[in-house]
Amino acid sequence: MAERYSSFAPGGTSWLLQRVTAAFLIVVLAFHFFLLHFVNHAADITFAGSAARMAEWGYYATMILFLVTATFHGVNGVYNALINQGLDGTTKTVVKWGLIVAGLLLIAQGIRLANVLAGGA
Amino acid sequence: MSRATAQYDRGAIEDFGRWREFTAGMWAWVFHKFTGWVLIGYLFTHIAVLSTAMSGPGAFTSTIQGLEGQAIVRVLEVGLLAVAVFHILNGVRLLLVDLGLGLEHQDRAFYASLILTAVIAVASVPVFVEGAF
Amino acid sequence: MSSDASEPADAAAAEAAAAEETSPEPAEEEAAADEGPAVPEPQQRRLAEKRARSGADAVLDDAERAAPAVEDDQTVHLRVYRYDPEVEDKQEPRYDDFHVPAKDGLSVLDALIWARDHYDSTLTFRHSCRQAVCGSDAFFINGRQRLGCQTQVGDLEEPIRIEPLPHSSVEKDLVVDMEHFYDQMDAVEPYFQSSEDPPGELEERKQSPENREKVKLSTRCIWCSACMSSCNIAAGDNQYLGPAAINMAYRFAMDERESDDATEHRFTTIEQEHGVWRCQTQFSCTEVCPKDIPLTEHIQELKREAVKKNLKFW
């Protein structure tokens, strides 16, 4: 109980963060879907269009935050689902670190991508 | 288990073979997990697809439009919408439960999220498949 | 011999005499009792009364059986899970069918006892109080965890499937291994703890009526393990404390009479990875609890309390 992991705080904290990120994602995911399927049609997406959106600092920041919270929420969710199924011992440690690494890589790639789209903003 | 007496492993006695006996809360848990896995899988795929932008504007635009041109992709997108909407609506239900609100009606809240998901998914079909068929 | 039976009515005594002729065993037993090492008088009397009673029953049943063939709607069809590692025939689990006479108010436990007494005395299951307070007879009846004594046969669809509780190892027939459940209960130290003596000169710790109301429902737990058996997380994750244990922790953590450090200690126990956080609010525990304890609600409250405590720490 006294151990502190890098991205996975024990018990209560990750439970709370899962809920906090959930509340944030409800709004932002709905917004994301709305913007990219209803306001703009998916078939009309072009590099230019995306770059224009990303060049706006507010939108850029929201997207980065969206990526980070979604990655945490998803990876933490998967981790907990596996523990509920009985994941234990060494396998658990391996899976946990694998998930952390995958999550960090995803975030890193996403930020690189956002920067490319935003034109190095 | 602790004791070493002869014990019989009955396997998953209560699991999917008995789906007709599942309660609302159990269905909610099963669906939330299933949609969760789909969404995290999609997240990784999504970033991968968008990463074509690193190869230049042309690559990005043609990849996206190439995908969007296929009818099957449009259909899958409706599926993705349904999955995301259910996860969000049931997620709201779970947040309410976590806050201790409406515990007596938790099963009705689940049915409501199912119905609302269906409504939203069906209502979105025209917009989603526009131009693909 | 009948003269020893002072309680039963004359009719019963006469029937007992008749029974003694038809069932040789009691007579032999009685003879052995008389000739063997000194059996105390009162015990002899009680045994004779008992035989007279069961003798009367046996006659009644013979009469029932002799009556025109009992129609199907007058019996109840049970399908009971059988397993016995020590008997060759039963090493692979199977289902036995029993047809038990239907009566108003027949409970599943009554039906099982009747089947055991009249058809197969090797049918094994736990039971005790038959009034839903001991927690011994939790079974998986028609796909749901219920207490045998608390479930009316008339409310169920036939054939009534009676199986041992899921997610526990079966020892024999309907008896499951309860050790894992007890381990989880013990892990939360389900007894009152306080490092402080009662305030002042008083010898008692006082509890306000409001506080009592708060913990009232959680005190009803009879340790039947129906809830644990219904929880998918408990099934998957062996280390999960389970709804019953967490409810026990709630009962004491929310009791104002315990000292603050005891409450702290309790929260530390349930805040561990396989404690309250494993609960996915599936609500199955709340649905099957035979004592109507709002288990999920209690677990949720503990989660919120734990979060508040942690936030304060920071």
Image (cartoon, helix red, strand yellow):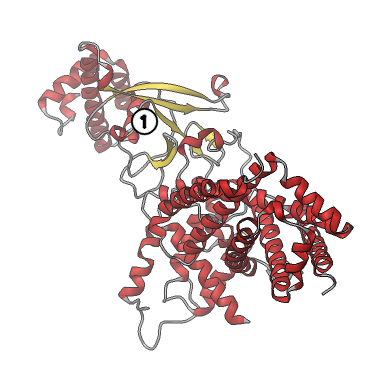
In the displayed structure, C197 sits above or below B44; it is: below
Residue A3 in view here: no
* Quadrant the N terminus of chain A occupies: bottom right
Q: Is residue A78 left or right of residue C108?
A: right
Question: Residue C233's x, y, as percent?
Answer: 57, 50
* Quadrant the C terminus of chain A occupies: bottom right
Q: Is residue A100 left or right of residue C242?
A: right
Q: Nearer the viewer, residue A87 or A42?
A: A42
Quadrant for residue C256, please give it: bottom left
Question: Residue C217's x, y, as percent?
Answer: 36, 61
Q: Is residue C292 left or right of residue A24?
A: left
What residue does disc 1 label? C112
In the displayed structure, A52 sits above or below B41; it is: below
In the picture as drawn, the residue positioned furthest to the right comes out as B55
In the picture as drawn, the residue positioned furthest to the front comes out as B131
Residue A48 in view here: yes
In the displayed structure, C166 sits above or below C25; it is: below
Within-10-Å neighbours for mark 1: few <14, some 14–19, many 20+: many
Q: Chain of mark 1?
A: C
Tag 1 secondary structure = helix
Residue ID at (36%, 52%): C291
Q: How many marks?
A: 1
Q: Nearer the viewer, residue B101 or C72?
A: B101
In the picture as drawn, the residue positioned furthest to the bottom comes out as C200
Q: Nearer the viewer, residue B31 or C47?
A: B31
Q: Nearer the viewer, residue C220 or A8?
A: A8
Quadrant for residue A13, please give it: bottom right
Q: Amino acid at mark 1?
A: Leu
Question: Residue C173's x, y, as percent?
Answer: 49, 31
